[in-house]
Image: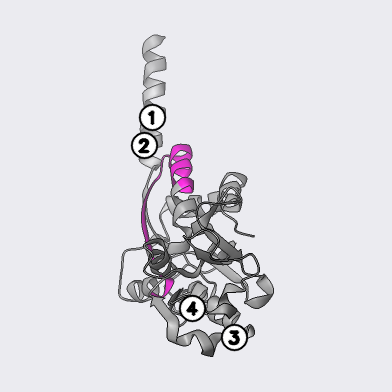
Amino acid sequence: MKSAAFLVSASLLLSGAAQAAELTVAVAANFAAPMQKIAAAFEKETGHKLALSFGGTGKFYAQIRNGAPFEVLLAADDETPARLEQEGQGVAGTRFTYAIGKLVLWSRQPGLVDDQGEVLRSGAFERIALADPKLAPYGAAAMQTLQKLDLAEALSGKFVQGESIGQAYQFVATRNAPLGFVALSQVFAEGLLTEGSAWRVPETLYEPIRQDALILARGRDNPAASALMRYLQGDAARAIIGAYGYGF
């Protein structure tokens, strides 16, 4: 009996190992912190393994078009996944919005950024960081905000642009820029500011930052890809996503 039970247990273990798969995922820079937590929980629950790459959505688009071996894309916008799907680089019907991003004006210096964003009108700073509006959705949102405030032209000489929101964040984090527009998720956790001072930019000042996920053509037959998409829409992942200030 013990021998039979052992064989059954071994069979189940081998079956689970056979079903586990590895998945390469391109993740928008703003989503790095929550995705690392989600990945750990996902791997523990499913047995699948994730290889995560973080970067700018615009750069990922070019890499995917040039044959980069990504199987899933978690973008910082909804336009890039839609374009990849239309171009045959993604699996039709797998695209959905996994998070709605929020923009924040942030400084590592306490008290520099007030809770109404009036520091922008004072101009009492040498540089302001933002992601490239042509490449990064959060950069586009920052420009929309400044244009609606009628400050884009006045502050243009102080812009320090990064390729992605991750680089824009680094400019401020390393104090190469005293303040900058970054993703809320980069500086808030569990509803609290992690450091410095910040202004949550009203969502009326920029278009919604809908962040879409897509299974790419290379991930079509990978069971871990569909499993991850289901997991991102479940309660466990959404709790993590919400804790970093994202909407749905």
Name the spot of residue 191 as percent of width and height, x first. Answer: 61, 51
**Residue 1 occupies quadrant:** top left
Front-lying residue, 103 or 227: 103
Front position among marks 4 and 1 = 4
Q: Earlier in the sequence, mark 4 or mark 2?
A: 2
Amino acid on which disc 2 is placed: Ala
Compared across the picture, whether 176 is left or right of 197 comes to left
Q: Residues within 10 Å of mark 2 (few under 14, many from 20)?
A: few
Where does label 4 land, which residue?
83
Q: Secondary structure at mark 2?
A: helix
Residue 140 vertical position relative to residue 74 in the rendered view, above or below: below
Q: Is residue 171 visible?
A: yes
Q: Earlier in the sequence, mark 2 or mark 3?
A: 2
Where does label 2 land, which residue?
17
Q: Which residues are magenta?
A: 37-58
Name the spot of residue 150 as percent of width and height, x first. Answer: 61, 87
